[in-house]
Each structure stands twice: as C-alpha cells, then as structure tokens.
Image: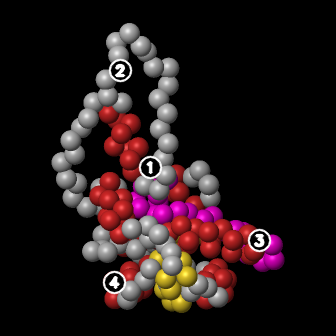
Amino acid sequence: MLFGGMMTKILIADDDNVSRAKLEIIISRFSDCVVVDNGVDAYERAISENFDMVILDIEMPHLNGIDTLKQIMLLEKPIPVIMFSSLTQKHTSTTVKCLELGAIDCIGKPSSILGSSLDALKNELLDKLAEASVIPTIKLRQMAKTAGLLEKKEITEKKIHLPKDRKSQAILIGISTGGPQALQSVLPKI
C-alpha cells in the first residue's frame, strides 16, 4: 500500500506469536513487512535496513519496547514508531511515557484479535500508519531532543506578559503529535 504516497517497508516487533501473525496478515496486504520477536533484533534490523515505520510491543525479551523505542529515536534518521501493547491502553502512564519518548501513537492490544476486533484493529492500525507515514524526519529528531534523548540546544525563553489590569481565568493549550514533550518544557514555565 502507498502510505504517504510511496511504497513502505514496516518492521513489526512482538514476542506474541498470535499478535505477530495477525499484524503480519494485516500489514502484508498493504505493505512490505519484516517480523521479529524481540527488541534486540528489531533494533539491529532498524539500523541495517531501510524501514519507513516500526510497530513495537512493549514486553519483549532481550530489549523491551520502550528501550528499543529510545534506541530507534537516537538513530541518525529516526523511524516513526507505533507502540502496540496491552500496556498502552488509553490514558495509562505507559502510553504517556511512549509518547514522551517519541512514539507517534499507541494502540492497545485487544484481548482477542478475532472477528470484529480484528477488523477494528486493522482500521485503527492502518489509520495510524497513514498518519505516521507523513511525519518528517526533522520532526522525529525534534521529538527525540524534546524527550531528552539527544543533547538539547539552548532554548531562548519567551515570557508571556498579560496586561496588569486583566486576570486570566484559564489558559488553554492544544497539543498534537509531540505534544507531551512540548508540555514538559512549557508547563514548568507558566
């Protein structure tokens, strides 16, 4: 399949045989894919081959998905990563940590990936892969910097001055991809 207007190659790293097989079935219909069962193999393949995206489980032998994500974000050309794990259910601290470290998105691994849940997974996964396919490398490098994985350059702080005769009741901040990292640097300054 064409994600972002080009043919893609996706690396899938998951130690669960059933999940790995289901992901491969979904992805192989739309893109080239390589499947591994641990974080070390995932990282070694990521540095030696040209992948457009990576799908990582968190709980894997030898090198877990979070540490693999960190290593991928440190590459000269980071690769967009989508986390796929039962530990990344919505609103968990693990999800936030993955996003802070540079994951493009997280998909909670369904307890059963058969029938309608497989269709739902397919739709969600393909949507997120399409989103990830258009993330520029420069944005991924900036996400790695913001996460503290790369040496941070001096950032000039800009102070926001409100007129003295007006008091703010609320400040609204909207975030998108990379938002958790941005909030870490903005909130302490407010």
- Give SS at disc 2: loop
* Residue matched to label 4: 47
Looking at marks 3 and 4 on the same chain, the residue that comes earlier in the sequence is marked by 4
Q: Looking at the picture, how far across and down is residue 13, in whole percent?
A: 51, 80
CA gap, disc 1 to disc 2? 25 Å
Amino acid, disc 1: Pro
Report how far apart the C-alphas of labels 3 and 2 lie in the structure: 50 Å
Of tags 4 and 2, the one toward the viewer is 2
Residue at horizontal 81 percent and vertical 77 percent from the top? 115
In 3D space, how far apart are the residues under numbered discs 4 and 1 (Cα atoms)? 26 Å
Quarter of the image where one finds residue 19: bottom right
At which x and y percent is residue 113? 73, 75
Q: Disc 4, disc 2: CB below 8 Å?
A: no
Label 1, on which residue? 180
Residue stretch rendered in magenta on the structure? 96-117
Q: Residues within 10 Å of mark 2 (few under 14, many from 20)?
A: few
Whether residue 159 can be seen here: yes
Q: Quadrant of the C terminus?
A: top left
Viewer-nearest residue: 172 or 101? 172
Q: Which residue lies most toward the left here?
A: 154
Q: Which residue is mark 2?
A: 162
What is the CA distance from the residue labelled 3 to the residue labelled 1?
A: 29 Å
Looking at the rendered structure, the kind of residue marked 4 is: Ile
Residue extending farthest right: 115
Of tags 1 and 2, which is closer to the observer?
A: 2
